[in-house]
Amino acid sequence: MSTIFKKIIDREVESEIVYEDQNVICINDINPQAPIHLLIIPKKIIETINDIDIDNKHLIADMVFAAKKIAKNLKIDKKGYRLVFNCNDDGGQTVYHIHMHLLAGRKFTWPPG
Ligand code: AMP
């Protein structure tokens, strides 16, 4: 099974790739919810955060490490940003290939909507 994100990773669907390393890519969200709204996506398809296990948990660290580097490059590290995983229906997940949202460029409220 493929996903829209896998097709972007495989260059079957066009998207501006902001960052790429061995295990993850980062793209602009097509429907941005903040001035900066990026998606950090593992190259391996994992459907939901519930599917993280002992063999793939390192990918979460790779995603967070990429986010840290991207935030520094974009000079948003000091001011701040938000990292979000949505899981399944109540979490608001719409693409079943895990991804971490990196949101920045405005002040976020808590609790989230
Ligand atoms: P989620 O609701 O957490 O599953 O997030 C999925 C995100 O993927 C949404 O914010 C969408 O706007 C975004 N999205 C869907 N298709 C694309 C695409 N082709 N390129 C970039 N972002 C996309």
Image (cartoon, helix red, strand yellow):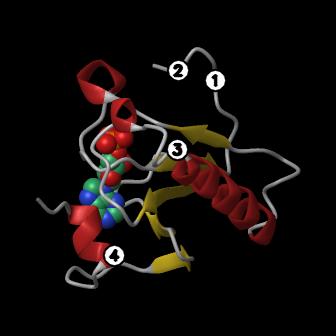
Nearest the viewer among 25 and 32 is 25
Do tag 3 and tag 2 residues touch (Cβ < 8 Å)?
no
In the image, farthest residue toward the left = 1
Q: Position of residue 93 (x, y in %)?
A: 30, 35
| Image quarter in which the C terminus is found | top left
Specify the label residue 109 is tagged with: 1
First in residue order: circle 2 vs circle 4: 4
Instruction: Residue 112: give its label.
Output: 2
Residue 57 badge: 3
Q: CA distance from mark 2 to mark 1?
A: 6 Å
* Quadrant that contains the N terminus: bottom left
Q: Quadrant of residue 15?
A: bottom left
Mark 2 element type: loop
Q: Residue furthest top?
A: 111
Q: As drawn, is 47 to the left or to the right of 98?
A: left
Dot 3 surroundings within 10 Å: few (below 14), some, or many (20 or more)? few
Q: Residues within 10 Å of mark 1 (few under 14, many from 20)?
A: few
